[in-house]
Amino acid sequence: MGTAFDDTSRSRQPHRVAIPPAKPFLQTLKSNLKETLFPDDPFRELKKQPSASRKLLLGLQYFIPILEWAPRYTFAFFRADLVAGITIASLAVPQGISLLVWMGGVDSSFVPPLVYAMLGSSRDVAVGTVAVASLLISTMLGKEVSPVENPKLYFQLAVTATFFAGVFEASLGFLRLGFIVDFLSHATIVGFMSGAATVVCLQQLKGILGLVHFTHETDIVSVMRSIFTQTHQWRWESGILGCCFLFFLLTTRYFSKRKSYFFWINAMAPLTSVVLGSVLVYFTHAEKHGVQVIGNLKKGLNPLSITDLAFGSPHLMVAIKTGIITGIIALAEGVAVGRSFAQYKNYHIDGNKEMIAFGTMNIVGSLTSCYLTSGPFSRTAVNYNAGCKTAVSNIVMAVAVMFTLLFLTPLFHYTPLVVLSSIIMAAMLGLIDYEAAFHLWKVDKYDFAVCLGAYVGVVFGSVETGLVIAVAISLVRMLLFLARPKTGLLGNIPNSMIYRSMDQYPNAESVPGVMILQIDAPVYFANANYLRERISRWIDEEEDKLKSRGGSSLQFVILDMTSIGNIDTSGISMLEEVKKNTDRKELKLVLANPRSEVIKKLDKSQFIKTIGQEWIYLTVAEAVAACNYMLHTCNPKHVTTAEANGQDSNV
Amino acid sequence: MGTAFDDTSRSRQPHRVAIPPAKPFLQTLKSNLKETLFPDDPFRELKKQPSASRKLLLGLQYFIPILEWAPRYTFAFFRADLVAGITIASLAVPQGISLLVWMGGVDSSFVPPLVYAMLGSSRDVAVGTVAVASLLISTMLGKEVSPVENPKLYFQLAVTATFFAGVFEASLGFLRLGFIVDFLSHATIVGFMSGAATVVCLQQLKGILGLVHFTHETDIVSVMRSIFTQTHQWRWESGILGCCFLFFLLTTRYFSKRKSYFFWINAMAPLTSVVLGSVLVYFTHAEKHGVQVIGNLKKGLNPLSITDLAFGSPHLMVAIKTGIITGIIALAEGVAVGRSFAQYKNYHIDGNKEMIAFGTMNIVGSLTSCYLTSGPFSRTAVNYNAGCKTAVSNIVMAVAVMFTLLFLTPLFHYTPLVVLSSIIMAAMLGLIDYEAAFHLWKVDKYDFAVCLGAYVGVVFGSVETGLVIAVAISLVRMLLFLARPKTGLLGNIPNSMIYRSMDQYPNAESVPGVMILQIDAPVYFANANYLRERISRWIDEEEDKLKSRGGSSLQFVILDMTSIGNIDTSGISMLEEVKKNTDRKELKLVLANPRSEVIKKLDKSQFIKTIGQEWIYLTVAEAVAACNYMLHTCNPKHVTTAEANGQDSNV
């Protein structure tokens, strides 16, 4: 065998496992808290600065990023941002009008982008309503209050929900709890988004079929019942128009997806549809033949809505719940989108800072009649493709949208509702990500289950049900990982000193008289009992196997503790019981490579004394070498041919 | 350097990382489910049997263990069991009477021990009311219904709660969900038991001070207010008597703890107190001077109580809640006690089977007017010390208690209540385990926080509050472990091929041009974002450090994946992004020792192709050797003195 065995037999002084010096409790607590809450060490730069005024400036720049980049802003940047801003405005106007009509007359494309341009640290995010989140607001609130019968109260609840969403988002950022968003895994988001998109699509059938009465429920069963009990109410003119525009929008997307420089076709398609639809209705007077049109839109800037926040309303709890759920969804999308594009361009985004920016934007928005906004993927992608340089493209978009809504709304008088439904539906169909779901199935069945849980929960139950199911399944997976950690036997990879799992490496050879067991998770209360029983079963099975073969009996049990990241007092009791158990069977328990946290606690709880410092080794190889040495010198009968031939061949 | 480096430079064929063959989905699911729900493989013996009748017998013996050991029962066993049974009966009688008086006239020491003797697989557990659990029943139900004003309804609710506790326990066992009990960690149990014991002690002040009116609340604030607003009602005769007996009981316990062969002093002390107290009252007629006595006890066997199960009662929900909480507490104690003593005597207990036994015992008990029972630690320890051999000692105890209660109850007419309060209080004081709490503080601060949370929650809030706080803190710890996994740099231990954490081994030396990063947890959605940012920070910091030293620049990043037990799709995306990031910085990403589950998923998601099969190594040493080889041959300027001297010295 290699050097370690030689060392051991020569000097009997293998490498020692170090016990890190005990740190004061408060110091440990402080460093743990710092790593948990400030893993990105955001004030690193600040600490290096000597002067106080420079520190103040850096601090201000930290919280208001525009102060940092504005001084370096050039005309070349502005030209790029102008093009990008006008491109996203052409996307924002029809989307804005769709939502205006669908959600009851509020535009959110003016104030929030301005706020984000000040506070946001992403250069690519284009602010707007996240379709899923804002349509969720309308379905969740729609259950409580009808936007048609009681538009005033509905509006109040919507801005209140937006307010709470903003407060929730900003507090997550301030409290450095941004990692909560991480608990919405990729699989959850895929399933949830697809589910929500399905729900919203189904809702659009109302507009496309020209129905007047429709269910307030969002689950597929209620919606289908509502549609098929009213077949006599379907308007075929509306339906045909809707299908044509849907086909047009999906076709343009298909082409722009195939060639990325056609992105502008996709970006312009909604506006084209609106113009085409309006012209068509204007000339055919289809509004008199069952095709509903927008009619007169309220024009003008967003009025203040401070007095509309309905804190005293009996529906306050619904508004808060809606705000928190949609807030976290919008946040998850916005932060993820910002991060992805920052990665493309290789700059860094602070998740917590982004949350504060999104939160502030929504709080200010809720005071100026705006609904929930975030950084939607589709608009941001267009912004990025159009070559934006900084958040100024948001300002351009805001001004362009404002101009349109101030002066051009009469142009939308004849826009058929069915075109707006088609635009929403096309956008939603793009969010049903069956390819991602298939990828999940292929790579990780459990993630697929999470995704499916979220989808089925949202489509057949409600938004909350879907979220709860998905998060619960995800958490159960993590808890199961801890409650049922993998254990396995290690064997020697031939012609080496390497010990690896015999499941993964079928050619690995077991060492006669020695069982090497590997535990693959931290040892906590949740798995201590399981591990105790599993270890004793491994020992029993190994003894049975050896007995049936009639070879040498088991003498040593080596626990490879490499993957045990931490241990608690229940885990230490477990080890003590394993030690008693092996003592009773006259086996020697040997530990290999206990890690820093583990060895510290084994030391404090006196377990090192119980097992004996000399039975703790730095590597499995050294532990095996020591066991072999004992077997050779103390029990010469145990030297088997396998050892004499196989193992020592490469000494 | 050692063999691996030689191998590499000679043949350039280091050991390959094996990708285990893909198994069919259903097979994986089946084996995972089996490992989760049947980790102990309970039917192992059964499968080996060829004949059907033998299988049936073994199956019956599995579910009814008495069938297994009864045929082998000998007279020597019986003699031992008789002694043990009578010893625990002498403990059971006064305890039984205390609870009889305190909880309203039901004895639980007859039917349940008989059921357990049939079904239980422990040879040492002595069945009885677990003081904490049954007193919890009385406090939780006492808030709803007063046992004095409405004894009938109170009794109905108590047996209903017992029934649900039994159903809950048995279903946990049947559904193989016994591991739920493991989520009550040692620290939780210590804190919770101490808290509940404190609460029960405080309740006994009513008896000791001879108070008539008392609060129904259990928290310390209400109890203290109740006591100190009634100072004029305190009966000093009662108080003095109580303190004397308490002193007597604590003294005997102190002595029997110091010498284990004095255990019988402790076992006899309660009965002695009852006798002494009764004699004292009888001769001094203290019952006429403010010392309350038991008076007439209902005698006779447990009547049937099927018709008393209050399924239609408006208080049903309270009964169910009480049943589930006390059921799981009783179960946790019973299973843990059974396991500990089985370990002493080196036999095996199946947790799920024990749960079915405890559950059935309580269901049958609830039909025969018995309150919740389990295997209390104190009584079991006495049983073990008295030399019991099998569950027959339970039968002996049941018969002895029945005899006493049938014929000897008149003897207890003059027993002062204050003695019973002292007995309960002394038992409870023994459960406040401040030594265990101190040990937790010393070994694991976080476990201490869990313990303290449970204690404070129970004492200042309620039983449920305490449990919820403790379980929540414990779960947060496990989730934090996953959400914020430890990462650290590895270095080479001098004169070896071993790479270990440079935090734990300060003498470990970093390899020039190579950064070796170790991740200490599975990579899941909950930590993927954190890890991505943390890894990029490690790289930035390392580059800054190298730049400031002016030495060789960073060329390779090795990820040691030994401790990554599993990965999900979010984790794979994280690795893909890390790869993009290192590519952009012109660093080479190298993986070392990916484990079975991880390499499978990396393969399925095509990440192996992205990174290149040749950049995945079996050990960190081989990865470093390959990196060094590249540095030497491709960039000779990177050969530094450290490498020339330190590393290669022991080739």
Image (cartoon, coloured by chain):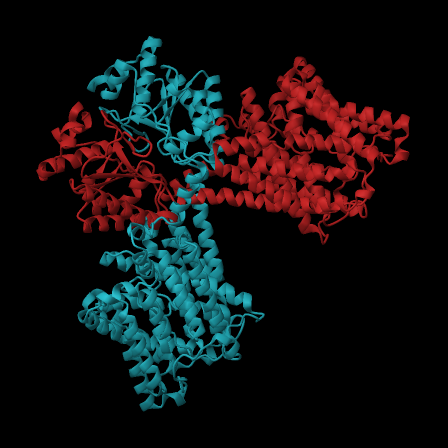
Chain colours: A red, B cyan
Q: Is residue B96 visible?
A: yes
Q: Is residue B70 left or right of residue A217?
A: left
Tell me the quarter of the image containing the C terminus of chain B: top left
Q: Nearer the viewer, residue B222 or A100?
A: A100
Q: Position of residue B615 (x, y in %)?
A: 38, 20
**Drawn side of residue A642 relative to residue A70, left or right:** left
- The residue nearer to you, when weighing B567 against B604, is B604
Q: Is residue B141 above or below residue A305?
A: below
The quadrant in which residue A641 appears is: top left
Side (left or right) of B633 relative to A200: left
Residue A303 visible in the current orientation = no
Residue B250 appears at what percent x and percent y?
A: 29, 71
Name the residue rendered at 41%, 32% in the picture: B22
The residue under the point 18% across, 26% down is A1
The N terminus of chain B, quarter of image: top left
Quadrant of the rendered structure where residue A187 is?
top right
Residue B278, percent from left and from top: 32, 85
Say above or below: A440 vs B5: below
